[in-house]
Image (tube, coloured by chain):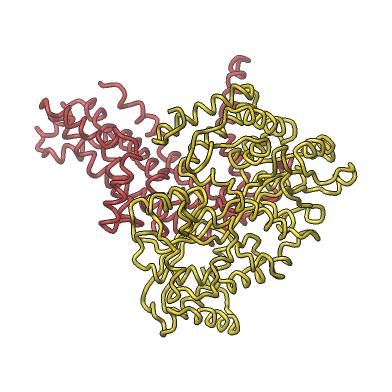
Amino acid sequence: MTSERRILNLLALALAFLAMAPFLWLLQMSFKTNAQVFTFPPELFFTPTLENYAALWNTGFRQSFLNSLVVSTAATVLPMLLGVPAAYALSRWQARAASGISLWILASRMAPPIAFTIPYFLAYRHLGLIDTWAGLVLIYLTFNLSLVIWMMRPFFDQLPRALEEAAWIDGATTAQGFWRIVLPLAAPGLAATAILCFLFAWNDFFFALILTRTEAMTAPVAVVNFMNYEGWEWGRIAAGGTMVMLPVLVFSLLVRKYLVHGLTGGAVKG
Amino acid sequence: MTHPRIARRSLLAGAAALGATPALGQAKPYAGQTLNGAAFQSTFFEYLRGYFPEFEERTGARVNFNTQAFPVYNQRTDLELSTRGSALDVVNVTFIYSGRWIGAGWLTNLSDFVADRNRTPADWDAADFVSGAQSAMTNAQGQTFGFAWEAGAMLLAASRADILDRANQPMPTTFDALLAACDAVQGRESMTAFVADRLHHWNWIPYLMGMGGQVFRDPPGNLTPMLGTPEAIRAAQWYADLLSKFAPSGGLSFSDDQAMRAQMSGRSMFRTQAITWLVPLAKHEESTVKSTVRYALMPAGPQGNYPGSNSHGLGIPAGSRRKELAWEFIQWALSKDMLNRIVRTHGYPSVCRRSVITGEAFKTALTLNGQDVASLYLQVLELGGRSGYMKYRTVPVFPQVGDTINRGIDRIATRQQGAEAAMRQTQQDAVQVLTRAGVRLDGG
């Protein structure tokens, strides 16, 4: 290895460490007691404790974590089920109206979320959807659907139509061609889109804050609940923050091969 | 949450107190109803929750009382009240929102309930609530929209009075004396002399007023900002110097809790802050300064003493469909008997009834490291009630103006701008946000 290469590797490691530093700091805080968190200068070597994680388990955070998992999973699966066929249809539809319809689909993304707050809140209160899983899934669905359609359409655009046509000549129906030929080829795009949908729902704070109370409260809101008026529970906040990051981290690691390919794949039309 | 076991005697005492309420003369008049309440998380509601079975047993109603983090609660309740929802029957009237919520007619006028002897027995004694704590709960016509359960009274606390004694420094009573004491102790035993949290629009105002300045010309009637005046510029420079010279590294971005822990661990000496964040120095299990902490009134400036005070109350949303039950709950939760029990059992330090504050139980609870802090607390609350100097804080537009103040002090303390330029900028920003909010200003 040349010395230039070594220096570049060291620089890459240093950059990676810098990027990871906030997460690592949060992680080590989650294994400290409140007293240790405020020790000055900070202790890098200490006896770790699991008391913050145990405390999370014994509070409402456990239910909030489950709420986040259920809602985010549903808010990923449903838009994918509806949005992927829609993106395929728009990709293959050769009418002038297709681009206009695509633009309208983006409408839900054209205003900041706060603009929708009051109408959603009033409608949800009327419909009894406040503080329910269904209410949250519905709102994430409206936002994620446009994301799925707009992300998946370029993937389908770049797939040669000749492949589907060959399948049709062999006797496949349109649905079979889509299911057996097109979808497997678009797998990286599906992975990237799914993870972005999951991230949007998982990380959302604003709508979960406004539209939930106690039963459907999600993990990001539950973490804020450790900021009490008379003092913050730093250890629990750190443990809660770590727990909130964990599923996203695991999910990203599992599909990272597809994710990198997927995020760049749709960018260039073939 | 499980309810702690209630002793039979306590249950009988509570039942007797409720029995005095005329509306409860009949047996379980609210059977089958559910009272929905909400507040931000506080030890007061944790303690009160333990007594809910008494209320439920006597009235027949079920209490569904949710507590959330301070910002979460305010955001949700603001939306609920602004849309005239009926989901909540009892809410916490948050100090900084009280002007907005009362002014917009989103809360129920409780004066009518208090005046009606069929609803409120005379010995409930609404006049017993300290005027300073109640001032945020009333409108310009003197009608009451909430009763205070918590009051914050700004005091001065020194975490290591032993170091002060060795430096021959008394507890400072003036701004000049505070500076002298800071100079004398800075760096001793690796300690910084002063610490504050980043909420300058709360911490700085007593210094501004002490130097003759004010936030608005004459709140709530005239909200013309007064942040570019010579007094404001001088006070801003003075306070920013205090922070930049004597606060710990990174102190400008400290939260309340971080500042409290800097004192609790003996890393910082002085702090001027509400009593809620100063009592833990003497009582918190993790405090290392329990035996050395000392309290005093907020130091006075050349133009007087204006310690900050605030309060949070219980009120009834205008949209509630169970107002009678909600009023029963408020009467019960804030009765002399209940507050005395909470003080006696849990040592709760921020009650607002004069008879409780001057009682033995409260005095015992607030005798901290041998000092009678209860009397300091009462003095500050009365000061705020007498001259009404805290009115600046309950006007609906204060949160926006407060943000401009925070930025101004930050710019001075970090040396990005001189005090004069920073405060003139702050004045301009304040005028802009007030104009945008439709507030009529002098010369506008």
Asked if residue B78 lies left or right of residue A82, the reply is right
Asked if residue B396 lies left or right of residue B413, the reply is left
Q: Quadrant of residue B340?
A: bottom right
- Let me know if residue A235 appears in the view: no
Locate residue B23, reporting x and y percent: 42, 78
Q: In which quarter of the image is residue A251?
A: top left
Query: If the image is split into quadrants, where does the C terminus of chain B sit?
Result: top left
Question: Could you say which is closer to the camera, residue B329 or residue A111?
Answer: B329
What is the letter of the yellow chain? B
Locate residue A225, reporting x and y percent: 51, 53
Total label count? 0
Locate residue B314, reporting x and y percent: 49, 61
Residue located 61% across and 38% down the image: B200
Q: A133 above or below B211?
A: below
Question: Could you say which is closer to the camera, residue A176 or residue B311?
Answer: B311
What is the letter of the red chain? A
Question: Could you say which is closer to the camera, residue B290 or residue A15?
Answer: B290
Residue located 20% across and 33% down the image: A104
Residue located 14% across and 41% down the image: A175
Residue located 59% across and 28% down the image: B229
Asked if residue B250 lies left or right of residue A162, the reply is right
Locate residue B283, reporting x and y percent: 72, 59
Q: In which quarter of the image is residue B119?
A: bottom left
Q: B219 above or below B61?
A: above
Question: Could you say which is closer to the camera, residue A194 or residue B84?
Answer: B84
- Let me know if residue A205 appears in the view: yes
